[in-house]
Amino acid sequence: MSGLFGEDGNLEGIQTMGIVNSLKTGNIVLDMTFAMIIPMVLGIVLGWVANIQKRLGEINWMIHFQKKNVLHTRIIRHSKMTSTYSTTDLDGDSQNEILIKAIQLYLDHKDILKLKTAELELRQIGEEEKKNNYYYYDNHNSTTLADTLSKYKIVKKPMKNIWLSLGKHGEGKEEHEVSLCVEERKEDVNDKDNSQSRQRHDLALRFESEGKDAIDDFIDQAYTWYIDQLRCLEDDSRYMYELKSTNGTNETDESSSSDHTYKRYQLSDEKTFESLFFKEKETILSIVNNFTNKTGKYSIKGYPNKLGLLLHGPPGTGKTSLIKALAQRTGRSIVNVPLARIGTNAELASLLFDSKYRVEGESVPINLGFKDVIFVMEDVDAV
């Protein structure tokens, strides 16, 4: 019997005979008709069933194949325009430059990529590179080039347009391989009158993985690590903030406050009133003490908590020294406001009331409130 049921044709014939026998009516004509029609119908039905099974198998295989090959993508883009005098972010309110920097530093710190070929960059995680300016740069703790460079480190960055593995990321059994490709494009852009050459720089980090959570997990790890590093490098120093020219001249700059960029120079604690000698010294100290301690007229409810001093005199008479001594006495930074370069009252108000200062070399704006700064208005007689 095993040989009989091993043949598909014999099995189909037996099924047909069984159906015909069960439908016998005793009428020769009907029985012959059933005997001819039933094999045809049964063959068609079995063919349909086999075809459906084949189709279902193909669909299951396609679904299985697609599940194994669907790639999730995450892209972090940053664009900026660089000219001779300034650098302008083109990302609007986005802070992608910070996220890209965090990922690059994290990759280097963890040595995730095991790079055989890499681009090298000298950079500092915390504050920007200090400029050698003997007039404003008062920090005497780092007077040599070696002292300054010791605060920097060499960072290895992946080459452009090459896919690299970041290893498996995610949680538990849902770990998946994550790949990274760094894409970069630079394009020279000239003004209509060819007065200034600029360069547009587009940078993108493209991540791919079969698990979207794996990419998000890696990015979260990098960003969390970067924040922890910044906390270790929090800077309580005081600085002199100088508004950077955007056009290389002293012409009026009518750009918005968000486009204003500052240079900053660290102030030392050595510029004090003890090294100043002038007849109004005690009077000024008394006023400053009342202001900082909210005594005298400043203790009156509703009295404006602000102090203004008008300084005049030729160069070398001590105006800058007095300003630095006031900053040291009150524990404040100095923001220099060049009135000759302010175009409108609205722009001046933006400079004074905007507590976020974009500093050259820093990707994150510096937050300074009124209690943290002294505003110095230059050339008030020229307004």
Image: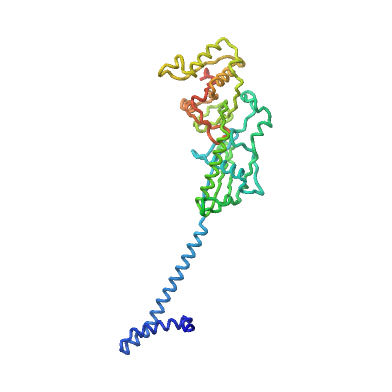
Of residues 52 and 135, the one drawn nearer to the viewer in this rendering:
52
Position of residue 276 relative to residue 120, above or below, is above
Residue occupying image coordinates x 50% and y 40%: 94
Position of residue 312 relative to residue 264, above or below, is above
Residue occupying image coordinates x 55% and y 15%: 312
Residue 171 visible somewhere in the drawing = yes
Position of residue 305 relative to residue 358, above or below, is above
Rendered image coloring scheme = rainbow
Position of residue 262 relative to residue 58, above or below, is above
User: Looking at the picture, how far across and down is residue 372, in whole percent?
Assistant: 51, 25
- Seen from this angle, which residue lies furthest top? 279
Of residues 338 and 232, the one drawn nearer to the viewer in this rendering:
232
* Number of marks in the rendered image: 0
Quadrant assignment, res 275: top right
Residue 361 visible somewhere in the drawing = no
User: Looking at the picture, how far across and down is residue 34, in whole percent?
Assistant: 35, 84
User: Looking at the picture, how far across and down is residue 380, in whole percent?
Assistant: 52, 19
User: Looking at the picture, how far across and down is residue 217, in whole percent?
Assistant: 52, 47
